[in-house]
Amino acid sequence: MNASTGVATPGLRVIGAAADIYKKVFTQPTLSPPHPLRHTGFDLDIRVEAVHAEAADVVSLTLAGAEGEYLPSWRPGCHIDVFLASGRQRQYSLCGDPHDRHRYRIAVRRIADGDGGSREMHALCAGDVLRIRGPRNAFPFVETAPSYLFIAAGIGITPILPMARAAGARGRLVYLGRSRETMPFLAELPAGTELRPDDEFGTPDLPALLATAAPGAAVYVCGPPPVLDAAQRSLFAHNPTASLHTELFSARPVIDGKAFDITLARSGLTVRVDSAETALDAIRRVRPDVAYSCRQGFCGSCKTKVLAGSIDHRDRLLPPGERADHLLTCVSRAAGGALTLDL
């Protein structure tokens, strides 16, 4: 801007035009859209090369091709599906170096009262072989933002860490956790990272942290539901030109649920789904071996054919051609009355 005339100089006009283009393409006063269509990726056998303790109840696993081959390329935000010996399928964000085509790295927090998937991962040793699928990306990193604010909570650091590295000087990382002892990868954080463990700083003020994002910033948040909910409630009130990109690391609670019955056609069993539980949780009481993975309605592992009944779809995956007679049991429910499933 020319101070004497109030007219923008050519250089500033170019910068302003670039900012306008970014704003039109990448920023909306809403959440980043869901990504129901993802590349299937690759199915391959992979070898556990190393296991390292990264924090209390957190280990990292370095994975290499079973025959030392190149691995499929990936970008920040990608995850892989891991198929365990028990038949469980789990998803883990890649948190290593995207330029290293010989190795992947994931991190797993042990959940003592979980269903056993994390405990099974923690029991793996160097030399064990796993079947994986991917990489796939449901949390893509926008590389052209003018600036970034990354907020990672606990194990949510795993997809954020490669993004913060890729953003370089344009990015700012705020890392939340219960204590330093529970927060993995402290020695690998980019310079300038704001480390805010609860036992030193108290409960984080998410709206205040989000208010520090620059206009037009890409804001990436990964962590448990309360962190994401706070971001969704407050970011755009402070910064309507920002874009919000989120990934959830645990299942959301059921909202506005009503109890209903499910009949499993193959066995004839009927189970009651309470108003605050998912159909998947109810089914697992009588069929603990039933397939599932993300518990958030985007991976498709729990897709089940519906033989009778109306469906309240709450997923982000099923295409229109499957919504009449399929549902994802981890999130979707009966739209009134009972359901009969091909289980």
Image (tube, grey):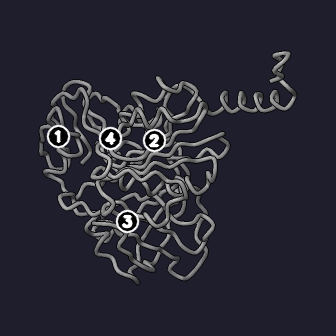
Quadrant in which residue 158 is drawn: bottom left
* Residue density around tag 1, few if under 14, some if 14–19, many if 20 or more, within 10 Å: many
Check disc 3: other Cα within 10 Å, few if <14, some if 14-19, many if 20+.
some
Of 195 and 290, the residue lying toward us: 195
Q: Mark 3 and mark 1 in contact (Cβ < 8 Å)?
A: no
Q: Residue at x 47, y 62 (%)?
A: 133
Residue 39 x %, y %: 56, 52
Mark 1 sits on what residue? Answer: 263
188 vs 120, left or right, is right
Q: What separation in Å lies between label 2 and label 1 (alpha carbons)?
A: 35 Å
Q: Which mark is residue 225?
A: 4
> Which amino acid lies under the numbered mark 2 shown in the image of this protein?
Thr
Q: For mark 2, does the 10 Å Cα neighbourhood hold few (<14), some (14 to 19), or many (20 or more) residues? A: many
Q: Secondary structure at mark 3?
A: strand
Three-letter code for the amino acid on which mark 1 is drawn: Thr
Amino acid carrying mark 4 in the image: Pro
Which quadrant holds residue 186?
Answer: bottom left
In-front residue for pair 222/280: 222
Q: Earlier in the sequence, mark 3 or mark 4?
A: 3
Mark 2 and mark 1 lie on one chain; the one further toward the N terminus is: 2
Q: Earlier in the sequence, mark 4 or mark 2?
A: 4
Q: Position of residue 263 (x, y in %)?
A: 17, 40
State the CA–CA distance, disc 1 to disc 4: 31 Å
User: Where is 192 relative to 309, above or below?
Assistant: below
Residue extending furthest top?
Answer: 5
From the image, tell me which residue sits under label 3: 83
- First in residue order: circle 1 vs circle 3: 3
Q: Which residue is mark 2?
A: 246
* 265 sits to left or right of 223: left
Q: Amino acid at mark 3?
A: Phe
